[in-house]
């Protein structure tokens, strides 16, 4: 940098802000007084301000500079001192980046530091694009978690790259205007289709996939061929070629060609190794249409299920083809269909007596208007969350015979909503918390014969709050903890 350039960067930013504030309000268009008929209208002097122009603002003092502007000035001056080689634009961009970190990164915030680094990598260092990605994660218009975006980073780099190069083929050409879930899906659909056209090269294939991967073909369901990539240790030599490359990863890339799966990017085998080391990958492929689905099974349950666009199945569509893979894995591999998928695709075959009836199941049942099908004797009303759900959504089905009043949190919940259901003869006063519950909610209805006299915290609480119920003959004064309560 030469001396002249150095001189330009060392400007007084406070003075710059003041000058901006001193600028006059924009004057209105000059008005011309109509002339009398037969005379030419006079021309206003370009050097004289119109009479209607506002007066110039007085010069701003230090006290007049708004706090927000003063804050920017202070931060710019700090950066100017520590980073003399940065332009004003670069310094403003650095301030925006620091604001993003302060707002979104850290413990109990949206992103971890590593996830923010991934987003910056996806955005190619562009702070506005990083902000756009973060805002879409935060408002839910981008239907994935920060962890899933991290897994899908390679694809999102491709989406943004193709958007930058072929922006004219997207309906919305300013990424900051893509805000709703529908607009984000349209963006990814367009990018996905452009990438698929760009990468499709049938001349490189030899034979059909059925012919090439017959040893991995485990069956068919409807129009779909089902392939299974077995669970394996990526460090094992079992599936490696002479150069040490994982053969199954190459299989995954070819079976998953044209998709947005992180297990088939062709750029890194990191996520393929992560998924396949914890459970098999099942890939359903319709040779006639190219539609594909992939499921990762772990410990006999679904860990993830995606279509070729890396989206969850559309449970609102009874004809969604994901049901073919669900049915195949149920019938041939013994993998139970998730309850949400059962409600969507096979409601007639649901075993209502065999459901777990956890809160997720109960919410799905309520939201799909199937409350009349609940087997209430299978609903564990001794679980705090479940009982609370029953009280809120179907109070007429509260079953005292199915409630353990001694279970954690149950007394307070029942006492608040349905105190008449409490059988105090069953309530054991054997802890500090339960003693407090008896004092607070039971009063004269409590069976004080149920006190556990060996529990020092229980006796301590009752001595303070309800000493008259203590039968001292039941106390073991040889227990130092008990005796100390009375010695003090």
Image (cartoon, rainbow, N blue to C red):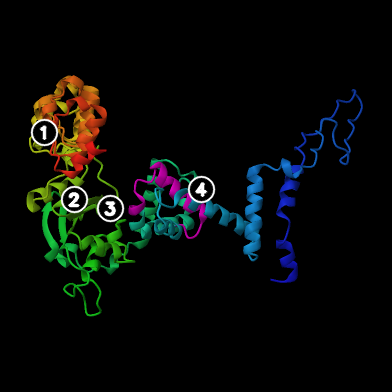
Q: Name the residue under label 2.
A: 302
Secondary structure of the residue carrying numbered label 3: loop
Q: How crowded is mark 3: few (under 14 residues within 10 Å), some or many (20 or more)?
A: many
On the image, the x and y values in percent for residue 166 come to: 46, 55
Q: Mark 1 points at which residue?
A: 474
Q: Is residue 54 left or right of residue 230?
A: right
Rounded to the nearest angstrom, the CA distance separating label 1 from label 3 is 70 Å
Q: Mark 3 points at which residue?
A: 308
Q: How crowded is mark 1: few (under 14 residues within 10 Å), some or many (20 or more)?
A: few
On the image, the x and y values in percent for residue 348 come to: 10, 34
Rounded to the nearest angstrom, the CA distance separating label 1 from label 2 is 55 Å
| Rendered-image quadrant of the C terminus | top left
Q: Which of marks 3 and 4 is nearer the N terminus?
A: 4
Rounded to the nearest angstrom, the CA distance separating label 4 from label 2 is 38 Å
Quarter of the image where one finds residue 32:
top right
Bounds of the magenta segment: 123-148
Q: Which of marks 1 and 4 is nearer the N terminus?
A: 4
Query: Is mark 1 in CB contact (under 8 Å) with mark 3?
Result: no
At horizontal 42% and vertical 46% (from top left) the residue drawn is: 136
Secondary structure of the residue carrying numbered label 1: helix
Q: Mark 4 points at which residue?
A: 174
Q: Earlier in the sequence, mark 3 or mark 2?
A: 2
| Rendered-image quadrant of the N terminus | bottom right
Quarter of the image where one finds residue 320:
top left
């Amino acid at each position: 940098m030469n001396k002249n350039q150095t001189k330009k960067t060392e400007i007084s930013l406070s003075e710059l802000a003041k000058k901006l504030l001193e600028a006059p309000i924009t004057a209105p268009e000059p008005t011309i007084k109509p002339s009398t008929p037969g005379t030419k209208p006079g021309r206003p002097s370009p050097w004289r301000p119109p009479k209607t122009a506002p007066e110039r603002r007085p010069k701003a003092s230090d006290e007049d500079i708004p706090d927000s502007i003063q804050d920017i000035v202070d931060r710019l001056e700090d950066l100017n001192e520590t980073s003399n080689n940065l332009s004003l634009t670069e310094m403003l961009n650095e301030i925006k980046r620091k604001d993003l970190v302060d707002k979104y990164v850290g413990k109990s915030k949206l992103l971890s530091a590593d996830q923010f680094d991934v987003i910056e990598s996806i955005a190619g260092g562009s702070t506005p694009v990083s902000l756009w990605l973060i805002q879409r994660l935060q408002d839910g218009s981008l239907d994935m978690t920060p962890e899933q975006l991290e897994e899908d980073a390679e694809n999102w780099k491709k989406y943004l790259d193709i958007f930058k190069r072929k922006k004219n083929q997207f309906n919305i050409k300013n990424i900051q205007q893509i805000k709703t879930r529908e607009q984000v899906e349209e963006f990814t659909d367009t990018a996905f289709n452009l990438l698929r056209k760009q990468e499709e090269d049938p001349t490189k294939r030899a034979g059909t996939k059925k012919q090439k991967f017959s040893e991995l073909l485990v069956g068919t369901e409807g129009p779909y061929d089902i392939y299974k990539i077995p669970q394996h240790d990526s460090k094992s030599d079992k599936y490696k070629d002479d150069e040490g490359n994982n053969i199954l990863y190459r299989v995954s890339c070819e079976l998953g060609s044209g998709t947005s799966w992180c297990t088939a990017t062709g750029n890194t085998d990191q996520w393929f190794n992560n998924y396949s080391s914890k459970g098999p990958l099942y890939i359903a492929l319709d040779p006639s249409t190219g539609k594909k689905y992939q499921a990762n099974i772990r410990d006999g349950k679904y860990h993830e299920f995606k279509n070729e666009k890396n989206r969850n199945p559309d449970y609102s569509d009874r004809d969604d083809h994901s049901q073919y893979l669900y049915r195949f894995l149920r019938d041939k591999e013994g993998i139970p269909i998730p309850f949400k998928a059962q409600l969507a695709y096979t409601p007639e075959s649901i075993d209502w007596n065999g459901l777990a009836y956890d809160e997720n199941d109960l919410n799905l049942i309520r939201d799909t208007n199937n409350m009349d099908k609940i087997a209430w004797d299978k609903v564990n009303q001794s679980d705090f969350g479940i009982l609370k759900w029953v009280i809120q959504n179907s109070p007429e089905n509260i079953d005292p015979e199915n409630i353990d009043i001694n279970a954690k949190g149950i007394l307070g919940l029942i006492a608040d909503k349905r105190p008449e259901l409490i059988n105090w003869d069953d309530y054991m006063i054997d802890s500090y918390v339960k003693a407090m519950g008896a004092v607070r909610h039971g009063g004269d209805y409590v069976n004080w014969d149920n006190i556990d006299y060996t529990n020092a915290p229980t006796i301590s609480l009752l001595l303070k709050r309800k000493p008259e119920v203590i039968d001292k003959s039941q106390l073991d004064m040889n227990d130092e903890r008990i005796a100390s309560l009375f010695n003090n």
